[in-house]
Amino acid sequence: MDLHGVHVPLITPFAENGEIALEALEGLAHAVLDEGAAGLVALGTTAEVAMLAEEERRAVVETCGRVARQRGATFVVGAGSSDTRGSAEALRGLKDEADAALVTVPSFVRPSEAGVLAHFTVLSEQSPVPLIVYNIPYRTGQTVGAATLRRLGELPMVAGVKHAVGGVDQDTVTLLADLPENFAVLAGDDPFFSALLALGASGGILASAHLHTGRFVELTEAWRSGDVAHARALGHRLSVMSASLFAEPNPTVIKGVLHAQGRIPTAAVRLPLVPASRASVEAAERQV
């Protein structure tokens, strides 16, 4: 599958009564696609998925999936857990619902890299949709090196990796220098999006792209076309903006800015998250 370009992991907006504001969610989905996003991601970390009830998750998938189908966009759904059997069951439920599933490296249990490979081997054999491995060691507590990522990329149903290691380390450089065939690397740390594109990443799954989506799309196209001077300058500006949006736990600042812009009814988040401070939201607004 084609995983190039900018994919936006949508927030879950809440109404004043605490319920999901589905109309606002639909509006956000259309807005990022209007600006050139290649796809939507539902039930990612940015969606506060851990704090959503099962019926709320279904409503989010239905709403985002409907927009993606209407617009011909790629639709990815976050699925799975640290339990391999439970993850396989969740993936089976995505048949006819999604184009791909975003599946995090098992967290908390901290398996070996051999265990990570075995986990995704089983999922690859049982999943009805392609898998995007979510490699985010500062959340999972599990490092996955370039050699293991390459082996994951050789599995028949693994389409790519959302790569979010907190920077550009040696494994990142090594992986991008020698990718398996048809294996996409998608940047997952927004401030380092431009750096990963320069090294050969296919695109990104970027919460910051709720704002100025078109500029992130422009950055992708600039690196792809070889317009290095423009790509560097734009990449630096977007990196500063992205860093400001992650000044407090995601998606609190993004929600604060979207609410200030009148795009969502409240900036509310669910515990244990708390809303971003006014200072952080105002600082981000100055960069947007």
Image (cartoon, grey):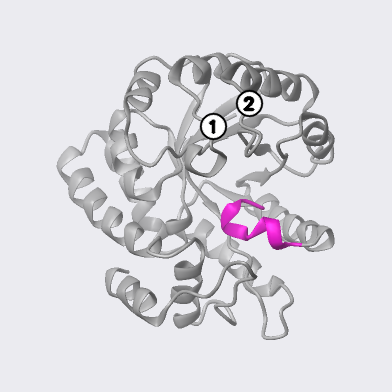
Q: Which residue is mark 2?
A: 111
Point out which mark residue 142 bears: 1
Give the left or right position of residue 14, taking residue 201 as reference.
right
Q: Residues within 10 Å of mark 1 (few under 14, many from 20)?
A: many
Kindly state the secondary structure of the residue where label 1 is placed: loop
Number of labelled discs? 2
Which is more N-terminal, label 1 or label 2?
2
- Write down the region rendered in magenta: 43-52
Observer-nearest of 70 and 223: 223
Residue situated furthest front in the rendering: 109
In magenta stretch: residue 46: yes
Observer-nearest of 95 and 104: 104
Seen in the picture, residue 261 relative to 196 is either above or below; the reply is: below
Q: Amino acid at mark 1?
A: Gln
Residue under the image location 70 percent in, 23 percent down: 119
Q: Amino acid at mark 2?
A: Pro
Q: Using the numbered discs, state the Cα–Cα distance from disc 2 to disc 1 in whole angstroms.
A: 7 Å
Give the left or right position of residue 26, taking residue 84 as reference.
left
In magenta stretch: residue 20: no
Give the left or right position of residue 248, taking residue 131 as reference.
left
Q: Position of residue 288 (x, y in %)?
A: 32, 69
Does the residue at mark 2 contact the one at mark 1 (Cβ under 8 Å)?
A: yes
Q: Position of residue 260 (x, y in %)?
A: 45, 82
Kindly state the secondary structure of the residue where label 2 is placed: loop
Residue under the image location 46 percent in, 53 percent down: 36
Seen in the picture, residue 276 relative to 194 is either above or below; the reply is: below
Residue situated furthest left in the rendering: 229
Give the left or right position of residue 91, taking residue 213 as reference.
right
Identify the image quadrant of the N terminus.
top right
Q: Position of residue 164 (x, y in %)?
A: 45, 39
